[in-house]
Image (cartoon, rainbow, N blue to C red):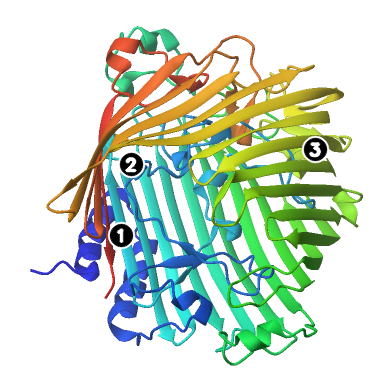
Amino acid sequence: MRLTPMLLFLYLYKALYQHTKMHKLLPYLFLLFSSLLPCLPAHALSLPDSLKKTKKDSTLVFWFNHNFEKSGNISLHPLDTVITGFQNYDPLFKKDHGYASLGNIGLASFDLTPYPFLNIHSGFDYGVHTFDPYLLKNDSVKYYRVLKTFSELEYVQGSKKEIFFHAKFSRNIYKTLNLGFEFRVMNSPGAYIRQRANHQNFVLTSQYFSKDYRYGVVANFLLNVIKNNENGGIKHDSLFEQNLEPNRELFEVNLNNAQNRIRENGFYMKHYFDLSRHPKNLKDTAYFSRKHFELGRITYAFEYNRQVFNYIDYEPKSGFYPDIFKDSTETYDSVTVNRIVNEISWSNPSFHADNTMRHLQLAAHFKQQYYEVREADRKNYFNQYIPSCEVSFIPYSTLNLTGYADYVFGDYNEGDHSVQASLSQILGGLKKNAGKLTVTAFYAFQKPGWFEEHYQGNNFRWDTAWRQQGILSLGGSYSYKNYFDAGFNLSRINHFVYFDSLAHPSQYGKEFAYLNIYLNEEINFWRFKLKSRLAYQTIQGANVIRVPAFLGTASLYFSQPLFKGAALFQPGLTFYYNTLYYGYSYMPAIHSFYLQDKRQIGNYLYMDVFINVKIQRARVFVMYSNFDSFFMGRKYYTTVGYPMQDASFRFGITWRFHD
């Protein structure tokens, strides 16, 4: 029996339906998947001539994001098919393990290297981001470019009935018209009671480009649903650390009937139109060699997004909360944030066969955004206008100077602004060089998130006005291909807003400094590979941000080809460590991490052993994580009161299809 994507999807559909109880979303996804595969006509995608030379294999898959207005040709990135790092399926740990979490996949998290603290671009921000790594966002949506119909299914089975499923699909409907989707499910009950995480993420994408690529449009519809139980952490750490009770489900927890829910849906569409005509033949070197005036590119983007935060607890009098303001029998806090954004841009990207940039590239943007924030007893409305500009100066091919600036007019964020600049120099030629040096500068003056000034819940309430926060940061880095990257960031921060030991927002009135030094390297020796990410950081002049002084991840791989190169066998080890520090506590009712001074955590070496195997288009991994807990002691926390997972097995498989 031939294994087709439809047959495999049916098997996984049955398993997910039984384990995740997704009685509403899964049937619709099944209908979509089953109807697209056999019925829609497939066409080979017409690509620019400059890209066809890289497309010798019709099964290759490329992707791009929505920020295509800066370059004439679309910047395509190959879809990752390597097995190195394949075992890191958790979206939180895709790149490294430098996060604090609550001991189960899909729960709230906090970045342990929290640079740059403020928003990269100015404008309204509600201020809750503890679940962002598990949400599909417009900036992370991938639009796939394929010559053949592409589908990929990923399935992971973990301990305690943990299920992870990820499906990708892309099909050319007609010439340069493409339709695709991504669907992801995470359902993990966790080792302790009331620790379940249940996520569903879905995005439907579409793209169309004219034959000469003078006009293009991309669009997406996304849906995120999170239903997480909250247990407030275990009551008695000694039971865990001394292993007095091996059955984790018998541990007492602080909350027995609480839940966090997040639901988000949105629509996005971006058009571009080049004001000057394109050559009919993109290989027309005579056209590109002639001097001619180009009018630039006009881009218009529209986005609608609706995000709902719900916190529910049927036992608010458990003693976990400091106050009860409204209802002592039930907590049902609800906040709805609606966003409508219109943005029009002009840029002068170069449209060359080799995709080279012009010496002076400019872009100007004008954004209008409208926000509604609805709580139980009040509604707030915001209307803002944000002009911004970008410049890229390339006097010669190995030197690049870029700059960005924005300013906010209107309502809550009136007067916010940010400026960024970078200078990079390639040491040598484009093909043969000794690496690249980069110097960066960043300045921002911004209001904190709305949530940090105004909130009305059953257990937490505040209404205050903070001063605008400021950050000035300078950085430098050196990189060599994909093997070495080292640098530093030195920041001066003032009027920083944080959550104090009572889980209330507060503002630090003085300045303080933050230094981050990092080193990322990859060493290859024969069939061995060592990949490491190391960071040293320190806070000077304040105690309102808590970070470990040192943290690092290292993975050691051994690769062995099998069956005359038809398969690849790769066993390995991964290590993660951070030094001792006063880590954060977590308050589920406000989705936030806050300061505590009672306990230090860290100084524990996490070790995973794994085997990755690649057989043609299938990748498989088997992993035994945190296996050193049997002899390293049980002090593996990244958040106070929330032990990380015990030693456990995981199995995963990814299978790609092109038919």
Locate the C terminus and report the quarter of the image it occupies: bottom left
Instruction: Determine whether label 2 and label 3 are within 8 Å by CB.
Output: no
SS state under label 3: loop
Q: Which residue in the rendered view is the most extreme toward the left?
A: 1
| Residue 279 picture quarter | bottom right
Distance from disc 2 to disc 1, alpha carbons, whole Å, reads 15 Å
Distance from disc 1 to disc 3, alpha carbons, whole Å, reads 43 Å
Residue at x 52%, y 34% (from the top left corner)? 520
Residue at x 77%, y 79% (from the top left corner)? 296
Would you call the spot at circle 3 few (<14 residues within 10 Å), some (14-19), or many (20 or more)?
some
Name the spot of residue 462 as percent of width and height, x first.
Answer: 78, 33
Name the spot of residue 401 as percent of width and height, x first.
Answer: 77, 54
Query: 635 or 534: which is nearer to us?
Result: 534
Residue highlighted by disc 2: 87
Check residue 153 in the rendering and tell me which mark sits there, or answer none: 1
Q: Earlier in the sequence, mark 2 or mark 3?
A: 2
Name the spot of residue 343 as percent of width and height, x first.
Answer: 76, 69
Check residue 453 in the rendering and tell me which mark sits there, or answer none: 3
Horizontal relation, residue 117 to residue 585: left or right: right
Instruction: Determine whether label 1 and label 3 are within 8 Å by CB.
Output: no
